[in-house]
Structure formats: structure tokens, C-alpha cells
Image (cartoon, rainbow, N blue to C red):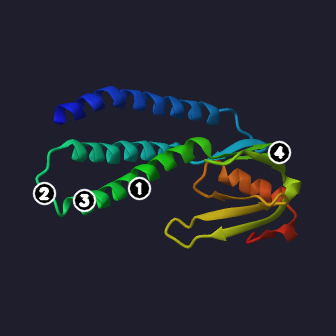
């Protein structure tokens, strides 16, 4: 059984790695476009992509190796243990895949007055700064002293930009200058 696992790794791993690194290069090229205070992209840093890929490979490898390796357990404890094993590691694989997808697909493009939001699974939508109905800025009191901005539009759409995102400070300045004071909360 271990030879089968080695063959599977030898065939599938290079294909998966080539695909994911091509996506990373594409995202990096897109982000390296000249950004200004009027035109920029808000997205997660690429180290989240690396973390997602590494976690996916690690947890999927553990699942594959432990599935294909021979084991000597009693027949009564095996079904429950296998259900727990696949639920935990399957969940970890999907979380890492979601993190990878979020890094690549979830972006906010600000192009002068137009804001276009791309989510992981939803359709992209656009609006202008004048179509913002409310902005809530929340500070997180943790060691990093991070914060987030929750934006609601007149179309009923809501999205959140965290301070960990690339170009967060640019977006914060634009919100302060473009959105009326009575529509903002948490800005001093």
C-alpha cells in the first residue's frame, strides 16, 4: 500500500503545486500594478495563500498516508475512530482550501469613485462612495490592536475590510474623506 501512496504523490503533487504557484504568481502580478490613493486593490497578504497551501498539503498528506497505511485496530473501534479522523482532517483540509481561495478570489478594487467587491463564492458587485449607507469602524482590543471596517451599501450589501488586508490604510483615508460624517461610526 505504501508504494501506491508514493505513486499518487509523485503524479498528483507536481500538478497541484504547479497550479497553486501559477495562481500565486497571477495574484502577485495583479497586485503589483501601480497603486495610487485613487486606484488600489484591497486583499489579504500572500502569506495567507502560502499558509493555506501548506496546510492543505500537510493535512491531505496525513489523511492519505494514514488511510493507505496498514493498521491493526480492533474491528469495534475502527468505524468510530475513522469517522472522527476523517471529520477532523477533512475539515482542516477544507478550511485551508477556503483560506487559499479567499486569498486569491476575495478582493476589493477601488478605481477612483467605483468600488468593486469580489467575494470567494458570490458574484462581484460594484457601487460608488455615494452609495454607502453606513460605515462602522471597530477596534479589536487584542495584542495586535487590529481593527475592521464594516460597510453597508444602499443595495443592502455588507462587506468587511480588516486591518490585516493590504491597502487597508488607503481605504480608511478614502472612507474618511469621501463618506459623510453622519454615516460613519467609530471614527474620531
Question: What residue did someone put label 1 on?
Answer: 91
Give the vertical position of 39 relative to 74 (above or below). above
Give the distance between the C-alpha atoms of the residues marked 1 and 4, in whole angstroms: 37 Å
Q: Residue at point 14% right, 50% down?
A: 71
Question: What residue did someone put label 3 on?
Answer: 79
Asked whether disc 3 touches disc 1, contact meaning CB atoms under 8 Å apart, the reply is no
**Rendering coords of residue 25 (x, y %):** 53, 30
Viewer-side residue, 32 vs 156 = 156
Viewer-side residue, 24 vs 147 = 24
Say what secondary structure mark 1 lies in: helix
Question: Where on the picture, by quarter, is residue 155?
Answer: bottom right
Question: What residue did someone put label 4 on?
Answer: 114
**Rendering coords of residue 47 (x, y %):** 48, 45
Q: Residues within 10 Å of mark 2 (few under 14, many from 20)?
A: few
- Which image quarter holds the N terminus? top left
Indicate which disc, 3 or 4, sits on the residue closer to the N terminus. 3
Amino acid at each position: 500500500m505504501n508504494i501506491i501512496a508514493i505513486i499518487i504523490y509523485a503524479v498528483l503533487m507536481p500538478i497541484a503545486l504547479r497550479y497553486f504557484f501559477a495562481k500565486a504568481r497571477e495574484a502577485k502580478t495583479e497586485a503589483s500594478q501601480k497603486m495610487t490613493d485613487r486606484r488600489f486593490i484591497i486583499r489579504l497578504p500572500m502569506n495567507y495563500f502560502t499558509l493555506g497551501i501548506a496546510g492543505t498539503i500537510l493535512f491531505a498528506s496525513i489523511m492519505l498516508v494514514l488511510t493507505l497505511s496498514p493498521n491493526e485496530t480492533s474491528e469495534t473501534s475502527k468505524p468510530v475512530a475513522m469517522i472522527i479522523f476523517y471529520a477532523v482532517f477533512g475539515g482542516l483540509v477544507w478550511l485551508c482550501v477556503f483560506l487559499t481561495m479567499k486569498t486569491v478570489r476575495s478582493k476589493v478594487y477601488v478605481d477612483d469613485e467605483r468600488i468593486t467587491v469580489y467575494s470567494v463564492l458570490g458574484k462581484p458587485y460594484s457601487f460608488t462612495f455615494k452609495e454607502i449607507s453606513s460605515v462602522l469602524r471597530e477596534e479589536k482590543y487584542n495584542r495586535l490592536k487590529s481593527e475592521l471596517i464594516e460597510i453597508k451599501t444602499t443595495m443592502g450589501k455588507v462587506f468587511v475590510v480588516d486591518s490585516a488586508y493590504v491597502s487597508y490604510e488607503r481605504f480608511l483615508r478614502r472612507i474618511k474623506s469621501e463618506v459623510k460624517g453622519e454615516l460613519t461610526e467609530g471614527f474620531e
